Amino acid sequence: MKNKISNYLNLIATVNAIILTIIFLFFNPYKQEEINLGHVISLTCLLILPSIVSLLFSLMNKKLLAIIAAIITLPLCLYFGVAKIPSVFNLYLLTPIFYLFGTKFRFFSEKV
């Protein structure tokens, strides 16, 4: 049961990171300039790919690799979460929180 909760929390965190990154890149109300390909590539490599990798490793029950992939997304999610207050991008703060709780449920679901 706790493994399912952990998987759902990691799925929510991954979907949250992907949707918010797409909004940030393509539908950002605070940006007046064009979309730069370098920004798209860097945010894809720093947020979307580690989120997907963390979800896949979580589903494969590779806890350490899922934690490492989630830690990679932590600094950028924290930055985007507090850079513009209040805004829709404060929801980036939910991504590391969901990863943290998903990892907690994953660790404590196994018998010691």
Image (cartoon, rainbow, N blue to C red):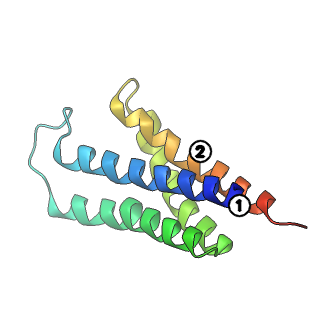
Foreground: 60 or 69? 60
- Nearer mark to the viewer, of 2 and 1: 1
Q: Which mark is residue 94?
A: none
Is 91 in front, or is 85? 91
Question: Which type of secondary structure does the marked residue at label 1 adopt?
Answer: helix
Q: Would you call the spot at circle 1 few (<14 residues within 10 Å), some (14-19), or many (20 or more)?
A: many
| Helix, strand or loop under label 2 | helix
Q: Position of residue 22 (x, y in %)?
A: 25, 50
Q: Residue lying furthest right in this view?
A: 112
Q: Of 81 and 49, which appears nearest the observer? A: 49
Q: Could you say where residue 84 lies in the image, as x and y percent from the top left?
A: 37, 30
Residue at the image position 62 percent from the left and 58 percent from the top: 4
Vertically, is 106 above or below 31? below
Q: Position of residue 44 (x, y in %)?
A: 31, 63
**Residue 83 drawn at (x, y percent):** 41, 35
Q: Pointer 2: residues within 10 angstroms few (<14), some, or many (20+)?
A: some
Q: Quadrant of residue 33?
A: top left
Left or right: residue 13 versus residue 34 is right
* Quadrant of res 36: bottom left
- Residue 52 lies, with reference to residue 12, above or below; the image says below
**Residue type beneath disc 1:** Arg
Total numbered circles: 2
- Residue positioned most to the left: 34
Q: Which residue is mark 1?
A: 106
Position of residue 102 in the picture relative to residue 28 (left or right)? right
Q: Is residue 3 above or below residue 100?
A: below
Residue 59's place in the image compared with 40, above or below, is below
Q: Nearer the viewer, residue 60 or 37?
A: 60
- Give the amino acid at mark 2: Ile
- Real-space Cα separation, disc 2 to disc 1, in angstroms: 14 Å
Question: Which residue is under mark 2?
Answer: 97
